[in-house]
Amino acid sequence: MMLLPETPRFLIKRNRFEDAAKSLSTLRRLPPDHPEILAELNEIKANHEYEMSIGQTSYKELLSNHSGFLRKRLLTGVGIQIFQQLSGLWLVDNWGRRNLLLFGAAGMFICQFIVAIVGTVSQSQPAHSTLVAFVCIYIFFFASSWVSLCSGKYSQSTKVFYTDTRALGACCLGSGEIFPLKARAKGLSITTAANWLLNWAIGYATPYMVDSGPGNANLGAKVFFVWGSFCALSFAFVWAFIYETKGFTLEQVDEIYAKVPHAWNSPGFEPTVKFIEVAEEVQQQPYEGGRRPTLSEIEASAIRRKSSVGLPEKDEKVV
């Protein structure tokens, strides 16, 4: 970690524009004075100035009804961390977040239920071989999408399936992308806390759910009906709440949350906001009553102002 370079956004936040240009140049593999590097740096800087112009974010505001899109993003981040744990990256930038998570949830759901059914109706050697096969298939779906490793105890064929989960991948990437810079640290702290809370809860509860004897649920292989049901629920959650952010900059993620009310409409969205123009509009036209304008309102105001430039006054005659 000590050897990794600082991110361009962090450096711009510290007013180190030249260092930010070098960092972005390394990331994009282009010279620091390349037009694409300069344009992206100006956009990042303008986005930072825009966010600073509307103030900082507190935990109270992040959780309140008045935070609008921030609370929606917070609940999305918490939800994806929770379902990552309850489900028991490589394609993330090529296939997209939504498609990858839906693919993983559907595959895990099928594998979990097959393991539960086979493990419940038979204890024969062919049944155990089937369990091992579908556990391996499950790991493929999990590792290529939600990404976690599981271990625990019931039988030799299901040992690899249980708890002590360590999570990386699409869920953590998605949680990191959805918050604006001013709320990212606080938002991620809450979503990460949700992840570890479920990590502890599942690790604590699984032995009681699986084992036999007094005080235990004695579910055995039936516990996979529980995990499979959560996989089905996670499929619905991804379809309803996870926005497709493939190919977007962190600045453009703000725009998709502001303009697209439903996540299932996000694939195919084309961003139009330039934060350089937005920052200029905020400075030139303050809003009354201390209300924070939405990104759509600011963009619409900027478009109206641009369209009015060069138009004749009412009393001016056009020749």
Image (tube, helix red, strand yellow):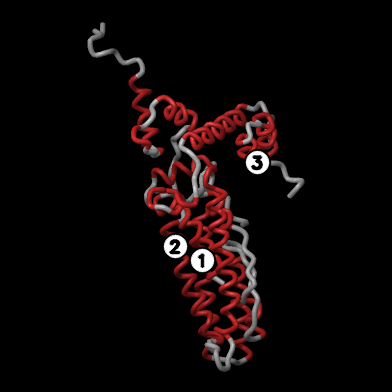
Locate the C terminus by quadrant.
Answer: top left
The residue that appears at 51% across and 40% down in the rendered structure is: 251
Quarter of the image where one finds residue 31:
top right
- Can I make out residue 296 in this image? no
- Can I make out residue 125 in this image? yes
In the drawing, does residue 284 fall left or right of residue 29? left
* Percent x, y of residue 126: 61, 88
* Percent x, y of residue 112: 53, 76
Q: Earlier in the sequence, mark 3 or mark 2?
A: 3
Give the distance between the C-alpha atoms of the residues marked 3 and 2, in whole angstroms.
31 Å
Q: Amino acid at mark 3?
A: Thr
In the drawing, does residue 46 fall left or right of residue 143? left
Labelled disc at residue 83: 1
Above-or-below relation of 126 to 26: below
Labelled disc at residue 261: none
Q: Amino acid at mark 1?
A: Phe
Disc 3 element: loop
Q: 10 Å neighbourhood of mark 1: few (<14), some, or many (≥20)?
A: many
To which residue does mark 2 refer?
237
To which residue does mark 3 refer?
7
The residue that appears at 63% across and 35% down in the rendered structure is: 14
Q: Amino acid at mark 2?
A: Phe
* Percent x, y of residue 173: 58, 53
Above-or-below relation of 135 to 316: below
The residue that appears at 44% across and 62% down in the rendered structure is: 237
